[in-house]
Amino acid sequence: MVYITSKGKINLPSYKGGTTIDKSIMYQYVISPSCNIIVEYFPKNLAPNLITAIGLFCNFLGLFSVFYFIGFNENIGGNKPTLEDDSSVRWVYLFAGTMIFIYMMMDNIDGKQARRTKTSSPLGELFDHGCDSLCTGLLPLIVGISMGIRSWEILIAFMAATIPFYLAHWEEYFTHHLVLGALNGPTEAECMAILFCFLTGIFGQWIWFINIDFSVFTFNYIQYTGQLNEIIFFAMAIISFVTAFQNILTSTKKAIDMKISLFTAYSQPLPFIIFFCSEFIWLKLSPSLFLTYPIIHILSLTFIFSYVVCRCIVQRICQEDFRLFYKPLIFLIGGVLNTAVKVYFNIEILDEQIAVLLLFAISLGFMIHFTYSIIQEMCSVLKINAFTIPSPSTKKLN
């Protein structure tokens, strides 16, 4: 399978690179200055893409440590954890938080290393944002487990993280700028994830089960009492949806300025709409499905989401038209139809558990194939190496 068309291969070398406008206060005054200092200690023969890959590996390492040592508690509405419940595994939360921190730093250092070594490339931009798309799906899962969030809340957090991420890249297709908010950008999300993991590691999960009475803060206008972890997750979801709405407004205005029909502009997020609606319908038809293999299910969705986002980024970089459908979505829709036939006609074509495992294997396969193929294609067109920087003598020979 070829992921770049002939037209795209002609346009790729002339790509000047997108501009990221990060308005984050934390990034401008803390993260970026720190990374400017740290990057000077990195050897100049260390490829930026390798730095990105190290960060992604650390994130996966934190994720699997949480899975292995803690797992996913399916006892919804169970007893509130006590001080002693997780005392023996609190180090796992601290480790996961540290891995997220390393990922965040590597994610910011890679671009600085690229400029420092003059090796910036379209492949580097794709690789960076592609790894970010994977981590966008993984972080809600790590933090959700650390905070004791269960099932549907984690899925809501997953959607709250992925929707604005996708729409931000849709907006970039028109504006050629990836604009990140002052207080609602990825830097703040990562810092909050680190903070939540560290707090759980220090105090234990029980702190997130404290009940908060909202009437105290709203002078009895809002009569609501809820657990701290649920309140935080739903607040983050609201912020994410507000951010997504801002992306839609900006993209609409830019499309009008560029004299692009709104039908064409609004059809471009169709793959994500299909992705979102298919998942919602599937879980609506079979609410217990998510509880069977919650981790496998989220990972499957993460791989499909990342695949769709990366394909969109390739189309923007290569100045190709947006595609409205991608093959991995066929298997997600197939899972929905398989469950629908069972629910409405009492006919089981394929066991749901097998369907979930099959979706995981297929989505992972698509992601691996895309990653390998697109790196080969871009390196061939741009005549660059993905994970090494040629020595000056090698460059002269070439």
Image (spheres, rainbow, N blue to C red):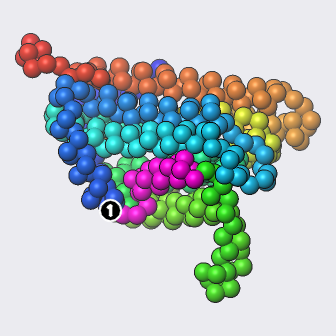
Q: Is residue 189 magenta?
A: yes
Reading the image, the residue beneath label 1 is: 25
The answer to whether residue 134 is seen in the rendering is: no
Q: Is residue 145 left or right of residue 375?
A: right
Instruction: Examine the image and state in which quarter residue 45 appears.
Output: top left
Vertical relation: 181 (above or below) 194? below
Mark 1, Cα crowd under 10 Å, few <14 / some 14-19 / many 20+, is some
At x 19%, y 35%, the residue is 41
The furthest residue to the top? 397
Q: Nearer the viewer, residue 310 or 211?
A: 211
Residue 75 location, x and y as percent?
78, 46
Instruction: Examine the image and state in which quarter residue 286 appears.
Output: top right
At x 23%, y 52%, the residue is 33
At x 27%, y 32%, the residue is 48
Give the overall secondary structure of the magenta segment: helix
Residue 160 location, x and y as percent?
56, 54
The segment highlighted magenta reads: 182-203
Check disc 1 and report its element: helix, strand or loop. helix
Vertical relation: 381 (above or below) 160? above
At x 9%, y 12%, the residue is 397
